[in-house]
Image: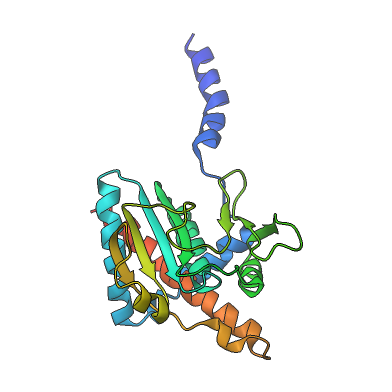
Amino acid sequence: MNKITTLLLLTFLPMSLQMFTSPPLFTKVKKYLDERAKEFEQIPQQRRKELKEIANHIIKKQKKKETTEIIVICTHNSRRSHFGQVWLQIGAYYYGLEKISTFSGGTEATACNPRTVAALQRAGLEIKNISSSDEKNPKYVVSYAQNIPEIYLFSKEYNSTANPQMGFIAILVCSSANEVCPIVKGAEQRFYIPYEDPKISDDSPQETQTYDERCKQISREMLYVMYCVKNGIKK
């Protein structure tokens, strides 16, 4: 009887572990984030302090077993806010954090810029345009691991019904949005961490480099937030 039990355990244990283990990140995405995680020292000390404030608020919610919803906001919801949404969500997955959902929005709706999409693809993400070819505000589907919920990117106002309406964390990443939204209706906490708009290099020889640099900067800092959360909930 003991031999049969042992045999059954040896047979089904690997299957059970496989069922409860999260699918791995795509190889290129994992490598990209591993590289960013080695660059935390590049983040200025004052900036790290500001990012830790965001992390501390998330930690409080995590310790209470509450769902954390975050909306990253810039003016047009076309570049920086999408970078923030994507890398916060993937950063949470990278560190094994659960009950964290990220969104993005603008003070006005335009379109997710194709240069943003291209930079994310160069970072290893698989992205599909699921809209018609003549759609002015296309919707993109972002995948970073097999068999897990995808991220949807499209431009919208931050208070769109596609986003949380109450109890979310608002992260403003451009000065214009910060000025227009001194108060973000429905947000339980508001943070301002500006990034330079990669739009400054559009249609120039530096375009690709600028978008890649901004993508790396935002991914590095959003990953740092989740790194701080991971360490904070252990205490």
Q: Is residue 114 left or right of residue 12?
A: right
Considering depth in this image, is 219 or 135 the residue closer to the camera?
Answer: 135
Quadrant of the image for the C terminus? Answer: bottom left
Report the residue at 39% width, 58% height from top: 70
Considering depth in this image, is 128 or 2 the residue closer to the camera?
Answer: 128
Q: Indicate the position of residue 36 as horizontal and vertical percent values.
A: 49, 71
Report the residue at 62% width, 84% height from top: 209
Report the residue at 38% width, 61% height from top: 226
Considering depth in this image, is 13 or 34 the residue closer to the camera?
Answer: 34
Where residue 120 sits, quadrant-wise, is bottom right
Q: Indicate the position of residue 21 as horizontal and vertical percent values.
A: 51, 40
Res 58 visible = yes
Report the residue at 64% width, 75% height from top: 115
Res 234 visible = no
Q: Name the residue furthest top.
A: 1
Where residue 37 sits, quadrant-wise, is bottom left
Q: Is residue 21 left or right of residue 26?
A: left
